[in-house]
Amino acid sequence: MAWFVLARGLFAVAVISMALLLRPINAPLAVNAGFGVLLALLFILAETRLRETSVSHLLGALIGGVIGLGLARTIAAAPVWANASDGRVMFLHSLLLLVLPYLGLVLGARKGEWLEPAKFVSLFRDAQPQQRYRILDTSVIIDGRIADLCETGFLDGTLVIPQFVLKELQMVADSSDAMKRNRGRRGLDILQKMQKMANLDVQVSDTDFPHVREVDSKLIELARALPGKIVTNDFNLNKVAQLRGVDVLNINELANALKPVVLPGEVMKVFILKEGKEYNQGVAYLDDGTMVVVDNARRMISRNIDIVVTSVLQTTAGKMIFGRYIEPQAAQGRTDVQAPATSEAAPKANGSQATPTGANGGEKTARVARSR
């Protein structure tokens, strides 16, 4: 950094000294010195902006500008019959010298990525099916399910691991926090396992984007340059990449799509693991990790019970199932409650008719007792 500051200072002193000695403006020394300072600042500003530009874009701009200048000189010299002293012809020559180099400079800078070796060689290759690239994110490597998915053969194409992702993974593995350190080391073990798979093509890409700071933005730029798809389970990266027009393969969305469909009213067997947040609730989990909230199941913790599904809630984080536990005795009592009620109706009716008879007999007995 100190070397850059020293070089810029010497350059500014040289420009100011040249302005003072040669006096490009017919004015006092102070005006020429100010003109030299202004020129030095403009050149230093241009240098700082160009320093953030990639080499391929700089080379493309240079080649485009040279080609444009050559075309302008050729076209200007072609019409030998034209009167060079005519103002219109001079204006046309000057316009060509300005327009063609400018177009070459701009177009060469915008198409500079075609000067990269991989893309430059692809121009001379035969037309072949385009290779499919799958760019891995740090989160999906640490997650670990990507290795199982590749082992099953559902993920095709070439897996690309960028160098900046490996650097971020190494920083996580060297963290002072024990949990982060274990996650980083697990991610490195996952990569080593994937490299040993026979039918899997894994490549480490050295392509970097110095003008981009965030790793997520670098992944998007790499996916647009290859082109390829980003494999991740980061929700925010998924949304930003889709806004930038980059295809994303989200592992969490795949896992949610593979979960079994459950409809309200179905009966399912679950294991109540813990107590729920609400009163008299129990919480269970399916084999795929789906949480099941069960009413009336608080006292059934550590037991397998049958529940009736009441509703299913789909969220961005996953799926939640709500159910209700019905005790077997209560269910059986509800089914049997109607039959005894009909059988007891007749005795109650007979008893209501016998009551007056019994009452009359009691009155007669009391009257006989009084007469005696």
Image: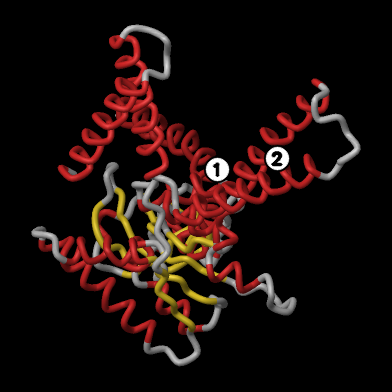
- Residue 100: numbered disc: 2
Disc on the earlier residue, 1 or 2: 2
Foreground residue among 149 and 84: 84
Which quarter of the rendered picture does the C terminus lie within?
top left
Q: Which residue is mark 1?
A: 349
Q: Residue at x 52, y 64 (%)?
A: 254
Foreground residue among 263 and 265: 263
Foreground residue among 284 and 80: 80
Which quarter of the rendered picture does the N terminus lie within?
top left
Mark 1, other Cα within 10 Å: few <14 / some 14–19 / many ≥20: few
How many numbered marks, from 0 up?
Answer: 2
Considering the numbered disc 1 on the image, is that residue within a helix, a strand or a loop?
helix
Q: Is residue 311 visible?
A: no
Vertical position of residue 285 compared to residue 83: above or below: below
Q: Residue at x 29, y 11 (%)?
A: 29
Vertical position of residue 215 compared to residue 105: above or below: below
Which three-letter amino acid code belongs to the residue tagged 2? Leu
